[in-house]
Each structure stands twice: as structure tokens, then as C-alpha cells.
Image: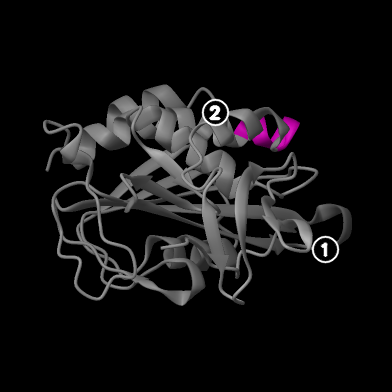
Amino acid sequence: MIWPTEAIWEAVSPLLPGFTVEVLPEIGSTNSELMRRARAGRMEPVLLVAEQQTAGRGRLGRGWASQPGESLTFSLGLPLAPADWSGLSLAVGVALAESLHPRVQLKWPNDLWLADRKLAGILIETASFGEGGQAQRYAVVGVGINIAPRDGAGLSTPPAWLQEVLPDLDAGSALLRIAPPLVQTLLAFQTFGFAPFQARFNARDALRDRAVTLNDGTSGTAHGASEAGALLVHTARGMNAVTSSEVSVRPTP
């Protein structure tokens, strides 16, 4: 695999001074590595790509393993200081979906779907370092995207892959499409929050106007994301704003 690291650096470095791109042949988890570096005081902006990830992590502790060429796995780490963090994963999803293909949809709170199958996942982790007025917040945005066909055994949602709609796209060219808009989105979110992304998320919302079931058994109809990034679900008890990332939402069979 030939990675377009120089082209990505040229596009992103004017936006993020000190930005670097690293590609590793194998690592446990790119998110874990960048969080480890941040705890050690290394808080520079960096895009860390793994050709193979052996201990990747998804939401709710789920694993995400990857094989070379089969998927694109990377983490973007940078200092970030928005006034409100609500809706960050939704804004990231908007950036990814709009960079990839018109048919890619967003499944609240941090998945990309293609024809009701999971194409990609997002895992965002943050940590604060320092004290008082010297404290800094470092954000790590982890992304895993299926590029080529993969086995769906053991997965709660059947997998989709990018080459279904973009057959000539490989992991490197997908990363070049994604990285600059992702950085632009994070900087815009830092300044404006989620509100400017609300309509763009709802335009690609895979759950909108569908019957859904929460993992506590509550059922209702999804009505898109609020200005704060909550999932609006109309239930028998009225409109419910779902905010916890620990809540699992599925279309009702």
C-alpha cells in the first residue's frame, strides 16, 4: 500500500501547525497509542494510520480488528477546546459521509451505514492535562472503515464496504478524501459547536422517521438529531431526547 502522506500533510498542515502523519504496519489500537502519548505530554496534532490493527476498540467496548487492505483504520489526535462537546461524533460522521459517497448514511451516534449495514465506526476519546488555567484538552478521533468485503460472522450488524459504491477506491485514496475535511470539521466544531451540522446530519440520518427500539426496551419513532446532538425519539410518553452514548438504538424489525 502506498499512502499519500505528503499530499495529506500539504492539505492539513496550514490548518494545524505542527501536524504530522504516521503510518504503522501494525499496532494494537491507534486510539490507545495517541492517548498514551498525550498522557506522556505529547499533545501535538497527528494522524496515526495502522495498516493492521489487532486490538481496535469500538463503542461499548466492542472490538474492531483490521487486516491490511481490507479496511482503513486511523486516529486523529489534536488539542481541542469547544465550549460544548455535545454532538462531536455526529459532526465527525457528517464530514466522513460527505467525503465518501451520497449513499452513505449516518446512524446515531457514531456509525456510518450503507443500505442498513455498518460501513464505518467512530470512537472519540478526550483527556485533560495540566491544572487550572494551564489545563489542555486533547481529543482523539478514531475511525474504522471497511474498504473491501469482510466476513460478518459474530457482528451485530452485517458489514458493508466502500468498494460496493466506489470499486476503485483503496484505503490510501479514501484517507486522502477524508482527512482534510475532517480537520476542517473539527476546527469548525470548536468554534461553532454542533448547530451548523444539525441539518447536514439529519439529511443523512439512517434512523429518521423509522420505528426504533432502545436497549431498555423503549420503542418509538426517530425524528433526527436536536441542535445539541441528542437523538429525538417520539415514544408513548412523548418526545424523548436520547443523549447517552451508552444507549444502543436499532431499527425495529
- Where does residue 104 sit, x and y in percent of width and height? 36, 37
The residue that disc 2 covers is 184
- Where does residue 101 sit, x and y in percent of width and height? 32, 29
Does 192 appear in magenta? Answer: yes
Residue at disc 1, secondary structure: loop
Q: Is residue 16 visible?
A: no
Tag 2 or tag 1, which sits nearer the N-term?
1
State the predominant SS element of the stretch in magenta.
helix
Side of 176 where 207 appears, left or right: right
- Where does residue 210 sit, x and y in percent of width and height? 52, 49
- Where does residue 159 sit, x and y in percent of width and height? 25, 57
Q: From the viewer's perspective, is residue 32 above or below residue 24?
A: below
Which residue occupies the foreground of this view, 131 or 181? 181
Side of 202 where 119 appears, left or right: left
Q: CA distance from mark 1 to mark 2?
A: 28 Å
From the image, which quarter does the N terminus lie in?
top left
Crowding at mark 2 (Cα within 10 Å: few <14, some 14-19, many 20+): some
Residue in the image at 59% along x and 37% along y:
186
The residue that disc 1 covers is 131
Which residue occupies the foreground of this view, 153 or 76? 153
Q: Amino acid at mark 1?
A: Glu
Q: Which mark is residue 119?
A: none
Residue that extends furthest to the front in the rendered view of this protein: 236
Residue at disc 2, secondary structure: helix
Which residue occupies the foreground of this view, 211 or 103? 211
Does 213 appear in magenta? Answer: no
Q: Is residue 218 visible?
A: yes
Which span of residues is magenta-colored? 187-193
Q: From the viewer's perspective, is residue 162 above or below residue 6?
A: below
Q: Amino acid at mark 2?
A: Gln
